[in-house]
Image (cartoon, grey):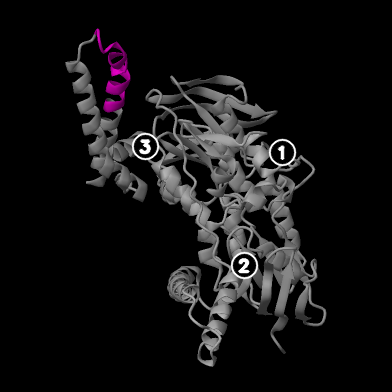
């Protein structure tokens, strides 16, 4: 019996501009597990719609096996306003899988899913033997664990790579490097020939007609060339630093009816911390963010902000965007300029840093792709200097290159970060500690990122099993034995190692600053002296942090 399911041959499609799909060909067979990669706006969702039969191409041939059944789960999570985005997403995925299609198309399936649901989806896809699964995703860990083949859509052309994602990245980088060298040589040749023709050399002779024809052909080649879209150059601005303690959380409590979200939670959020927030869908991660930022009043306890805290908030539902207004109007209203880092910049120039062309700046937001909306939200957010940055699912719909640039910006951010995300690799790369909503109002903090949390959770669960399985001896004796043999401290995570390496320099700089203030005239330098309590408190915290990390490292 044939494994053939579907094929596209020389399929082309345009929407009034350059070809979105330019003579695209691919073949899908039973058991295929492939990822479709490409930047935001390249046409990945368009290609899925063509495969699903929801969109007819302008040209080309599509051949489907008799009785072929295709299920397509799109990016959107619009619902009736009662379920969460993750619950809607999981329900749609389960419905599509239970239908047992021959071809399953998943467009950003991990958006809004909690980590447990992502693990479930990974396992489901890896177990498939008959169903063909094609995935568009920005989740790098999901992509690495699921895909055995890569289809890459770049400037309208589709290429197939028989390898996993890490190998594809290496080979694609080599290909783009070769392409850059090729066009550099072509450009040099074109410049030479243009200089030749401008010198007025007789071109009517038989001998030179071929050279003129070659020049005209070279001009046409450059005119038809589709250069790769540039890389985003967004920059995150930081407001003036506030006090050492950014948030003081005391006995925080909140519930929806009989369901507790947070119960008697106490913690300090210190300047420079990058804290991830994890939990199942519906556990209350967004609620916790709202409680911490004052958007929601607690039922019990208090959240007190430190001095000079400037807050910026990124909403996962992109609710701050106005669909009827253009991209430019959403960022700058009716103005032509915006203020970036205290400097005026034309709105077109600013939005170009986020990969919006002038034509796209004039486009209504309702016509944007999910990835473009995500970039626009970042553009709005980055206009507001803040020393407390709060981000609710910032990675949804971002292409991987923009996602990695955002990671870089957050790692260099000098303020404090509160981050809700289910992107495991993003959390591992960015955060220094993780708050986990574990149910029944319990919020527990773990040092490190997602992988560190999983390891520590596993160790705690193993310890519980050992306690349950132990002989029912004297509880006091068991406690004494436990006290006599303290658990070995957890190894440092990657982020903690980086933090430990940087702490001596930060401590040294603070000590020098404190010494300089103490040596100054307290009357003339009153403003500097006013900072001393905060600086000394910060130094104490950093020294304690260095000692704790150094002890664990040794």
Q: Position of residue 161 (x, y in %)?
A: 54, 76
Q: Closest to the observer: 459 or 452?
A: 452
Q: Which mark is residue 125?
A: 2
Q: Which mark is residue 212?
A: none
Is residue 466 at least partly visible in the picture?
Answer: no
Q: Earlier in the sequence, mark 3 or mark 2?
A: 2
Q: Closest to the observer: 49 or 35?
A: 49
Please tell me whether residue 538 belongs to the stretch shown in magenta.
yes
Give residue 70's quadrant in the image. bottom right
Instruction: Estimate the spatial distance between the alpha carbons at disc 1 and disc 2, rounded to whole Å.
Output: 37 Å
Q: Main secondary structure of the magenta part?
A: helix
- Give the foreground label among 1 and 2: 1
Instruction: Estimate the spatial distance between the alpha carbons at disc 3 and disc 2, rounded to whole Å.
Output: 49 Å
Q: Closest to the observer: 179 or 510?
A: 179
Q: Are marks 1 and 2 in contact (CB under 8 Å)?
A: no
Is residue 520 at least partly visible in the picture?
Answer: yes
Q: Earlier in the sequence, mark 1 or mark 3?
A: 1
The residue under label 1 is: 322
- Residue at screen point 24% across, 41% down: 550
| Mark 1: secondary structure | loop
Instruction: Estimate the spatial distance between the alpha carbons at disc 1 and disc 3, rounded to whole Å.
Output: 65 Å
Q: 372 left or right of 80?
A: left
- Residue at screen point 24% across, 7% down: 523
> In this rendering, is residue 141 above or below 484?
below
Please tell me whether residue 500 belongs to the stretch shown in magenta.
no
Q: Which mark is residue 474?
A: 3
Circle 3 residues within 10 Å: few <14, some 14–19, many ≥20: few
Q: Closest to the observer: 328 or 79?
A: 328
Q: How many numbered marks does the figure carry? A: 3
Task: Give the magenta range.
Answer: 523-539
Q: Position of residue 269 (x, y in %)?
A: 43, 29
Q: Are marks 3 and 2 in contact (CB under 8 Å)?
A: no
């Amino acid at each position: 019996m044939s494994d053939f399911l579907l094929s596209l041959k020389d399929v082309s499609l345009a929407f009034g501009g350059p070809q979105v799909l330019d003579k695209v060909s691919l073949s899908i067979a039973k058991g295929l597990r492939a990822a479709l990669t490409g930047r935001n706006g390249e046409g990945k969702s368009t290609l899925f719609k063509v495969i699903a039969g929801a969109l007819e191409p302008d040209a080309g041939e599509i051949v489907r096996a008799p009785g072929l059944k295709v299920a397509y789960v799109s990016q959107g999570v619009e619902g009736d306003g009662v379920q969460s985005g993750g619950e809607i997403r999981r329900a749609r995925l389960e419905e599509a899988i239970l239908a047992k299609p021959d071809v399953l198309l998943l467009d950003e399936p991990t958006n809004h899913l909690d980590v447990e649901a992502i693990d479930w989806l990974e396992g489901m896809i890896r177990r498939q033997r008959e169903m063909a699964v094609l995935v568009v995703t920005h989740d790098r860990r999901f992509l690495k664990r699921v895909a055995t083949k890569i289809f890459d859509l770049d400037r309208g052309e589709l290429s197939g790579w028989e390898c996993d994602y890490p190998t594809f990245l290496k080979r694609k980088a080599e290909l783009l490097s070769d392409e850059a060298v090729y066009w550099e040589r072509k450009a040099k040749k074109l410049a030479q020939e243009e200089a030749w023709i401008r010198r007025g050399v007789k071109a009517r002779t038989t001998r030179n007609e071929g050279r003129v024809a070659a020049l005209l052909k070279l001009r046409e080649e450059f005119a038809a060339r589709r250069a790769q879209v540039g890389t985003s150059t967004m920059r995150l601005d930081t407001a003036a630093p506030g006090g050492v303690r950014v948030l003081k959380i005391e006995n925080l409590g909140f519930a929806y009816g009989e369901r507790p979200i947070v119960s008697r939670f106490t913690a300090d959020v210190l300047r420079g911390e990058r804290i991830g927030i994890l939990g199942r869908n519906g556990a209350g991660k967004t609620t916790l963010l709202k409680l911490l930022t004052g958007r929601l009043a607690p039922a019990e306890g208090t959240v007190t902000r430190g001095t000079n805290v400037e807050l910026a908030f990124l909403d996962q539902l992109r609710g701050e965007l106005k669909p009827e207004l253009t991209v430019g109007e959403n960022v700058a209203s009716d103005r032509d300029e915006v203020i970036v880092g205290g400097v005026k910049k034309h709105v077109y120039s600013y939005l170009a840093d986020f990969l919006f062309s002038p034509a796209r700046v004039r486009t209504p937001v309702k016509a944007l792709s999910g990835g473009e909306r995500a970039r626009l939200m970042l553009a709005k957010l980055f206009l507001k200097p803040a020393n407390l940055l709060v981000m609710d699912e910032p990675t949804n719909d971002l292409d991987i290159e923009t996602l990695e640039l955002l990671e870089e910006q957050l790692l260099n951010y000098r303020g404090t970060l509160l981050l809700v995300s289910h992107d495991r690799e993003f959390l591992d790369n960015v955060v220094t500690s993780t708050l986990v909503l574990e149910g029944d109002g319990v919020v527990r903090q773990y040092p490190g990122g997602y992988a560190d949390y999983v390891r520590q959770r596993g160790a705690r669960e193993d310890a519980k099993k050992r306690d349950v399985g132990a002989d029912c001896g004297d509880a006091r004796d068991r406690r004494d034995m436990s006290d006599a043999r303290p658990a070995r401290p957890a190894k440092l995570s990657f982020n903690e190692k980086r933090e430990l390496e940087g702490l001596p320099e930060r401590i040294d700089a603070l000590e020098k600053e404190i010494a300089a203030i103490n040596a100054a005239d307290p009357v003339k330098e009153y403003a500097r002296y006013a900072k001393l309590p905060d600086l000394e408190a910060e130094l104490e915290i950093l020294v304690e942090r260095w000692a704790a990390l150094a002890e664990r490292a040794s």
